[in-house]
Structure formats: structure tokens, C-alpha cells
Image (spheres, grey):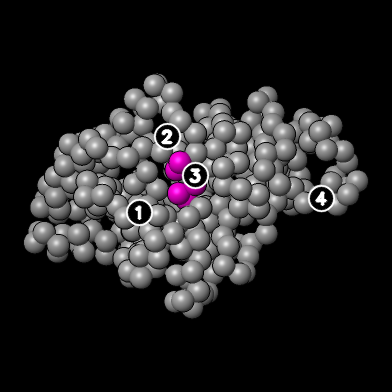
């Protein structure tokens, strides 16, 4: 049986050539990202670091771009820092930040609102980081349309979990999404802000896992929260956008509603993508709003 805490010899050789001898290596549980991550300790000074191997060259390129060109805008201590990279190994060495996923924290309503206010401010900094090239801007503008195109495949894959009326409802959401063409663009986290936020006590969260980061309509970063926590905690949602610095525009609100419905269908179609019970609740709520 392979030791999950061990590193392949070529990868370990690169890490130790970069950092010096390691005194500890521990594989971390899989999180929101499909990447493999190890907690490593450098022997010379006991520095705590993370070694991350991307699942694909595209993910490696996205994440290293994010750490070099966008993440520094978040400020010291608000996200990991990039220490070294190896395109050959699709590997990154990052500083390790304390804490656990914010979604796992047990916080009072007031504390949760405070943390989400600060999270909103953090996400605003990310969204405003950098300026897209003309090519990136064209790709960003087409991103939501690609999500709409995927909705038909997801509805087919959901099979009998959707009634005929529900399938028509989902296709209508996708069609409406395609005509929303004035959505503000920015540099998005892309992997679900809720999953990327970490908390270690106090009021300041941190943000990590940028392997899906890209330029896109900023509203895509709010879908996971709208699908889950915000549905039951409207004051937490209000605190987030207070920290974010603006409310969503009318077209963004429509897009978020459509994207939340499409996310629910994707979760119904693929149990590894999300919670099917929660997805059914979300879809039923959206249907009731329009009388389907």
C-alpha cells in the first residue's frame, strides 16, 4: 500500500533542492480543490509550508498566474504566498496559513456576520486585481454562456430526478442567462468562495485554492454561497455585500438566480459535485418563486 504521506522521489528531490531537507511531510485531506496538498516542514528553520500539485497543466497555469498577478492585492496574511514553482512537476510551494474551512466553523450569528463582512472586503480586492488582456476579456464574457450550454447536458444527466416541467424550467434559466450581457467582469476565485475561505479565530478570514481562478463575471463567485448559507441567513448575505462595497446590480441578481438553479441541477446530476438534498431544496425554492 502506498504511503499517502510520502512524496515521489523526483518531487521530493525538487522540493529539497529548493527548500533544503524536510523534517516532516503530511498529506492533507482533499478539500474543495482536486489538487494534492502536503504540509511540509523545512528542517533549517521549522518553517511550515504547503506543497501543492495541480491536477492538470491548465490548473497549474491558472493558479500560478493568480498567485503572481492577483493574490498579492489581497495583502499580507490574507492568502498564501507563492514560494517556488515547478512546471515539470505541476508543483507549487506555498506558505501555510492557520485555520480550517470557514464552512466548518461554529460561529454565533453576530460573529458570522462580522467574518462575512471582512470576507466581502477580501473578495472585492480579488475581483479588482489586475486588468484582463483583450483575449481574457473575450473569454470572460463568454464564460457564463458556456455554463448555460452545460445546463442542457446536466439536465439530461439528472434523468428522472427532474420532471418534464422542471427540465423546461432549467432550460429557461439557461436561456435567460445567455441574454444577460452587462455583467461586471473581474478576477474571480472560481472554485466557490465559501470553500476557499478559511478561519482561525478572530474576525479575519483568509482565502486559498486559486486553481480555478480566471477573469469572468464576478457574480459566478457568489453561487455556492447563494446555494447554501445565504438562503437561510439573509443578514449574513447583507453583511458580505456591505463589506464587498456594493450591492449586485439588477442583471447580476438575475444571473445569480439562474446560476444558482443551474448549480443545483449539476449537483443533482453529479453527486460528487454537491449535496443532492440541498440542491433539491434550492431548485424547489426557485420554482416556487415563479410558480412552477
Q: Main secondary structure of the magenta part?
A: helix
Whether residue 181 is visible here, answered yes or no, is yes
Residue 13 found in image quarter:
top right
Residue displayed at 29% across by 37% down: 144
Between tags 2 and 1, which lies in front?
1
Q: In screen coordinates, is 183 left or right of 97?
A: left
Magenta region, residue range: 123-128
Which residue is rendered at x = 61% and y = 52% of the image? 78
Q: Residue at x 37, y 27 (%)?
A: 137
Q: Are marks 3 and 1 in contact (CB under 8 Å)?
A: no
Q: Earlier in the sequence, mark 3 or mark 2?
A: 3
Residue at the spot of label 2: 215
Residue at numbered disc 3: 126
Say what secondary structure mark 1 lies in: loop
Q: Earlier in the sequence, mark 2 or mark 1?
A: 2
Graded by Cα atoms within 10 Å as few (under 14), some (14 to 19) or many (20 or more), the crowding at tag 3 reads many
Residue 205 percent location from the top left of the image: 56, 60
Q: Secondary structure at mark 4?
A: loop
Residue 216 within the segment the image draws in magenta: no
Find the distance from the CA under tag 1 to the CA under tag 4. Answer: 39 Å
Q: Report if the CB atoms under discs 4 and 3 are less than 8 Å apart.
A: no
- Spatial CA span between label 3 and label 2: 11 Å
Q: Which residue is mark 4?
A: 47
Marking on residue 246: 1
237 over 262 or under it: above or below: below
Q: Mark 1 or mark 4, which has the lower sequence index?
A: 4
Amino acid at each position: 500500500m502506498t504511503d499517502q504521506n510520502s512524496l515521489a522521489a523526483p518531487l521530493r528531490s525538487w522540493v529539497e533542492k529548493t527548500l533544503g531537507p524536510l523534517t516532516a511531510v503530511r498529506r492533507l485531506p482533499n478539500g474543495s480543490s482536486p489538487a494534492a496538498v502536503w504540509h511540509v516542514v523545512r528542517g533549517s528553520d521549522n518553517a511550515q509550508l504547503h506543497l501543492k500539485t495541480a491536477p492538470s497543466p491548465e490548473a497549474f497555469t491558472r493558479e500560478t498566474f493568480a498567485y503572481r498577478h492577483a493574490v498579492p492585492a489581497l495583502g499580507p496574511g490574507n492568502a498564501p504566498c507563492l514560494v517556488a514553482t515547478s512546471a515539470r512537476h505541476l508543483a507549487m510551494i506555498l506558505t501555510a496559513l492557520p485555520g480550517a474551512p470557514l464552512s466548518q466553523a461554529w460561529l454565533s450569528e453576530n460573529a458570522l456576520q462580522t467574518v462575512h463582512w471582512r470576507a466581502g472586503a477580501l473578495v472585492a480586492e480579488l475581483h479588482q486585481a489586475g486588468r484582463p488582456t483583450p483575449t481574457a476579456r473575450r473569454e470572460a464574457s463568454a464564460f457564463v454562456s458556456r455554463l448555460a450550454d452545460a445546463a442542457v447536458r446536466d439536465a439530461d444527466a439528472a434523468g428522472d430526478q427532474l420532471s418534464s416541467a422542471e427540465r423546461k424550467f432549467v432550460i429557461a434559466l439557461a436561456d435567460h442567462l445567455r441574454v444577460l450581457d452587462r455583467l461586471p467582469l473581474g478576477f474571480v476565485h472560481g472554485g466557490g468562495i465559501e470553500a476557499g475561505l478559511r478561519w482561525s479565530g478572530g474576525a479575519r478570514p483568509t482565502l486559498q485554492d486559486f486553481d480555478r481562478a480566471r477573469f469572468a463575471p464576478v457574480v459566478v463567485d457568489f453561487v455556492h454561497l447563494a446555494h447554501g448559507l445565504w438562503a437561510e441567513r439573509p443578514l449574513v448575505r447583507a453583511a458580505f455585500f456591505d463589506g464587498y462595497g456594493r450591492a449586485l446590480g439588477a442583471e447580476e441578481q438575475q444571473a445569480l438566480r439562474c446560476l444558482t438553479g443551474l448549480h443545483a441541477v449539476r449537483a443533482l446530476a453529479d453527486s460528487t459535485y454537491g449535496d443532492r438534498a440541498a440542491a433539491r431544496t434550492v431548485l424547489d425554492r426557485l420554482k416556487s418563486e415563479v410558480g412552477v
